[in-house]
Image (cartoon, grey):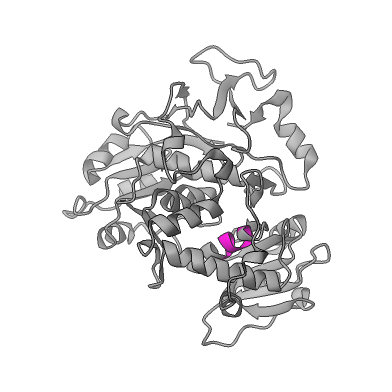
């Protein structure tokens, strides 16, 4: 439940078709975006990481071709799921696009999960391939994998160290190093012609009201997540994004890393958010834009003031939510503009505030009316309420495949959420 959201303005945003790669809507896929930017951005840096890893747009495309060929050799194919228990890393990003180049579905998993929570998502997604950080492999000990046709476990670790052994729950799978797959030669015949309607990923909800639900997200849905961020943050190829959120979350993955891809910006990724290191990283990495979710923006604002608070290149923060008591003060302190919005994994980001509006606490801003219809309704009847009345936010798409297509293997939950042909956000 989103706290403090009082209303949505209903007015237009710039045409999103004019932003990002010059691709027609029938090519709105992350795979097409990777190929486009490899040609147009070439050797410019796309991603950098705190461990020193970095990769250009061109090299990212090539390495995902190599990795896709390696994955094809172990049997990953169209419609298969690749279950990824990985921390923020270059390997995470490469595996996601490589899987999609084969038409497979990437399933990023919260790295804090253990026990029955991890088991539920593994069994529900039924993957054929599991990719896991070496330091997280023990999480699978004691997990019932009988419902999952796991044939291969990819270990992501320091190649100079021996691989950890597989727990008994994965003993029937073949264990492979990530490096052995990415060293494959590209094989054009293995590649899938990806379309906006193809499933890009399954992202699991937090599961606060029951077992976590796997949100089935088409390519077009994920592409629009990134494109909306480009419009909201006025992102260009001259920007440098700072992503300190987990890549298993839509905000980190689509609204930061892949927004950078589509805009031609570079993106610096750390494993986690640290309020004590945040400003120094912003300064050292010449960051111009970043996102802050939940308690993050207030933690940043409440941090000790410094004479260096405006000694940086940062100009914009997408902060959700922003409180009236500190929003304007945060802008003044750091010399930045805060932007707000409303969205969720299932529905995309359907509204953003304008950078020039200033801080309007509790306001998500204009709806992306070219793509979404939004009403505030009586939660009991689904009847739209008059302006300035409190109700539930209901959303539905105006164009195909910019929205979730259901909860994976949970048809009853899909029907429940889509009552009266509106998606019920619960907010």
Q: Main secondary structure of the magenta part?
A: helix
71 over 276 or under it: above or below: below
* Residue 312 or residue 58, whichever sits in front: 58
In the rendered image, the residue lying farthest to the front is 189
In the rendered image, the residue lying farthest to the right is 146
Residue for point 52% across, 62% down: 93
Residue for point 26% across, 40% down: 331
* Residue 94 or residue 286, whichever sits in front: 94
Q: Is residue 339 visible?
A: yes
Residue 44 in which image quadrant: bottom left
* Residue 135 or residue 52, whichever sits in front: 52
- Say whether residue 98 is magenta: yes
Residue for point 76% across, 55% down: 124
| Residue 82 drawn at (x, y percent) | 67, 62
| Residue 153 drawn at (x, y percent) | 69, 73
The residue range painted magenta reads: 95-100
Q: Decide if residue 352 is on the left or right side of residue 249.
A: left
| Residue 24 drawn at (x, y percent) | 52, 40
């Amino acid at each position: 439940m989103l706290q403090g959201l009082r209303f949505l303005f209903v007015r237009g945003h710039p045409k999103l078709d004019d932003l990002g790669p010059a691709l027609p809507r029938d090519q709105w896929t992350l795979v097409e975006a990777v190929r486009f930017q490899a040609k147009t951005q070439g050797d410019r840096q796309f991603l950098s990481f705190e461990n020193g890893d970095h990769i250009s747009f061109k090299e990212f495309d090539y390495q995902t071709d190599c990795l896709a060929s390696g994955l094809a050799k172990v049997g990953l194919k169209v419609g298969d799921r690749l279950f990824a228990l990985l921390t923020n890393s270059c390997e995470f990003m490469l595996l996601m696009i490589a899987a999609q180049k084969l038409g497979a579905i990437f399933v990023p998993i919260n790295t804090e999960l253990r026990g029955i929570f991890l088991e539920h998502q593994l069994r529900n997604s039924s993957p054929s391939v599991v990719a896991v950080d070496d330091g997280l492999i023990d999480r699978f000990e004691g997990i019932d994998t009988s419902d999952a046709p796991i044939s291969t476990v990819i270990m992501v670790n320091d190649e100079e160290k021996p691989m950890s052994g597989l727990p008994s729950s994965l003993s029937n799978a073949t264990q492979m190093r990530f490096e052995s797959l990415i060293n494959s030669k590209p094989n054009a015949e293995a590649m899938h012609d990806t379309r906006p309607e193809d499933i890009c990923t399954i992202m699991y909800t937090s599961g606060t009201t029951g077992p976590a639900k796997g949100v089935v997200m088409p390519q077009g849905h994920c592409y629009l997540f990134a494109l909306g961020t480009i419009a909201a943050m006025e992102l260009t190829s001259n920007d440098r994004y700072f992503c300190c959120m987990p890549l298993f979350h839509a905000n980190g993955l689509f609204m930061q890393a892949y927004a950078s891809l589509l805009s031609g910006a570079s993106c610096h990724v750390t494993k986690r958010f640290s309020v004590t290191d945040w400003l120094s990283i912003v300064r050292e990495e010449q960051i111009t834009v970043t996102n802050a979710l939940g308690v993050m923006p207030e933690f940043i604002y409440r941090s000790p003031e410094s004479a260096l608070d405006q000694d940086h290149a940062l100009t914009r923060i997408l902060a959700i939510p922003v409180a009236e008591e500190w929003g304007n003060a945060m802008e003044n302190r750091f010399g930045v503009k805060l932007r707000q919005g409303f969205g969720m994994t299932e529905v995309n980001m359907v509204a953003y505030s304008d950078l020039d509006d200033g801080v309007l606490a509790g306001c998500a801003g204009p709806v992306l009316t070219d793509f979404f219809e939004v009403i505030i309704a009586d939660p009991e009847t689904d009847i739209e309420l008059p302006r300035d009345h409190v109700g539930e936010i209901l959303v539905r798409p105006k164009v195909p495949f910019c929205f979730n297509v259901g909860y994976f293997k949970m048809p009853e939950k899909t029907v429940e959420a889509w009552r009266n042909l509106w998606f019920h956000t619960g907010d």
